[in-house]
Amino acid sequence: MPILHAPPSSINPLRFLSLLPRPTALPTLRSPPTVIRLARRFASMANSSAASGAASPEHVAGDWYSVPELRLRDHRFAVPLDYSADRNASQRISVFAREVVAVGKEEQQLPYLLFLQGGPGFESPRPTESSGWLLRACEEFRVILMDQRGTGLSTSLTVSSMSQIKSAENLANYLIHFRADNIVNDAEFIRVRLVPDAGPWTILGQSFGGFCAVTYLSFAPQGLKQVLITGGIPPIANGCTADIVYKAGIESVTVQSEKYYKRYPQDAEVVREVVKYLAESEGGGVILPSGGILTPRGFQTLGLSGLGFSASFERLHYMLERVWDPVLVPGASKQMSYFFLKAFENWLGFDTNPLYALLHEPIYCQGASSQWSAHRVIGEDESKFDAVEAAKEGRPVLFTGEMIFPWMFDEIHVLKPFKEAAQILAEKKDWPPLYDVTALNNNKVPVAAAVYYEDMRSGSGAPVGHVERKEAFVLIFTVGLVFSSNSSIRVHSSLGITS
């Protein structure tokens, strides 16, 4: 976990939060009326009802059960698909949350901590034992692991379930309800029904979960006691900020590619050989086990998992060791191994979490379309990332990072049915706001964050449980310091950290 790389003081929320400096001024962004109304509605619910955890039509709680050193209880909530619609008229979906405590603490009055998972489109962790950050959290908190809407047990949007929606337009209109704004609405729906007296709780946002945490601070701060963020600080400017993210990400992925070849210089020729083989194959690529096609540009996406996680350099190297089948019969033609092709598909993860591909760029949009931001930004320096050209010229082939491209919906088999819906989402302009800078500027909720040095993934979407390759360092701040693009972030020198 990233937080394990931080100084010990950062792991204790109380000590971590005591070091926060004062915020600075921010530009003004008008709050969306719909979200303001929702925030007031949730505040009213908190004042008028006590959350006991008992079963109701909107909330069903299960019995306690065990994994080693932990006790768990499942909760299911029937929430509106669209919070802006009439509550009685809106379609309902199910949101699942798992309550976790240390053994023997089931009945203790503990403060609540909501964990917001990285993504978008990934479910919360499934505890198998008391270890890592969860072990530490359960010393002080009653932890809530919420499957964000559309993931895990929360009306999961899978390749098969989304096939029920036959129209691309209808699917796109359904998917617009699965961004951070409604994830926060779900969290507030749960809080007022689960936390005794509907009191505020602490939230821990990892990667994309950090994006959700800032949305929470923008529109429902009354539900928050304190906020912890690891590796997920969003850009909050008007419009679609994806271009900013990808321009920074391209620089980082270039550096990481260079670092990889410095560690494994022999792999530069292996990669060039693979690119040439794919380019010269019939149809411009090799058929994957699932029925998709592996092209040179698809091969470059190995950087997503191969350059950004703990031990991923090593995993990528060992994967490339087995890229070719052995020649068993003299004169047999050279071919890529099933082992490698299957490993490539396993690394992508789109077959189990397609929401990640569909919503990856929309998570950056406020009142503007993404228009396939990563594809456009890469295109501005096309020759640099042209794998075929690099292979012909004997240059190192650069990998790409955490980016979704329109051609993926042609080449990755499980994404093909969603090509038209993805295009509609890429062109959508009227995305509602995700952040309220005025509210953030006046924030009173203590906030602390750990961010990564040389973050190849640009702060977005890594599933929790992985560790970034580089050393992590901790920035201590209030929200006001983070979100002004013109301000520098001050860091307490007593921690021995530089900005």
Image (cartoon, rainbow, N blue to C red):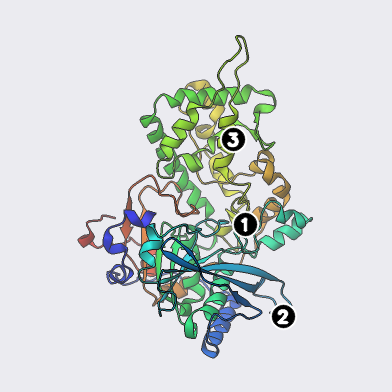
Residue of label 1: 369
Q: Residue 250 carries which label?
A: none
Q: Where is residue 100 in the image (x, y as percent from the top left)?
A: 46, 68
Q: Disc 3 or 1, which lies upstream in sequence? A: 3
- In the displayed structure, 47 sits above or below 21; it is below
Q: Residue 88 carries which label?
A: 2
Q: In which quarter of the image is residue 387?
A: top right
Residue 433 showing in the rendered view: no
Mark 3 is surrounded, within 10 Å at the Cα level, by few (under 14), some (14 to 19) or many (20 or more) other residues, namely few
In the displayed image of the protein, which residue is found farthest to the bottom? 48
Q: Where is residue 316 in the image (x, y as percent from the top left)?
A: 46, 35
In whole angstroms, how far apart are the C-alphas of marks 3 and 2? 47 Å
Q: Which amino acid does label 1 sit on?
A: Ser
In whole angstroms, how far apart are the C-alphas of marks 3 and 1? 34 Å
Front one among 30 and 144:
144
Left or right of 188, for residue 256: left
For mark 1, give the secondary structure. Answer: loop
For mark 2, give the secondary structure. Answer: loop
Residue placed at 55% from the left, 25% from the top?
274
Q: Disc 3 or 2, which lies upstream in sequence? A: 2
Residue of label 3: 342
Front one among 397 and 307:
307
Left or right of 21, for residue 148: right
Q: Where is residue 69 in the image (x, y as percent from the top left)?
A: 41, 63
Q: Which amino acid does label 2 sit on?
A: Asn
Q: Which amino acid does label 3 sit on?
A: Lys
Mark 1 is surrounded, within 10 Å at the Cα level, by few (under 14), some (14 to 19) or many (20 or more) other residues, namely many
For mark 3, give the secondary structure. Answer: helix
Front one among 250 and 102:
102
Image quarter of the N terminus: bottom left
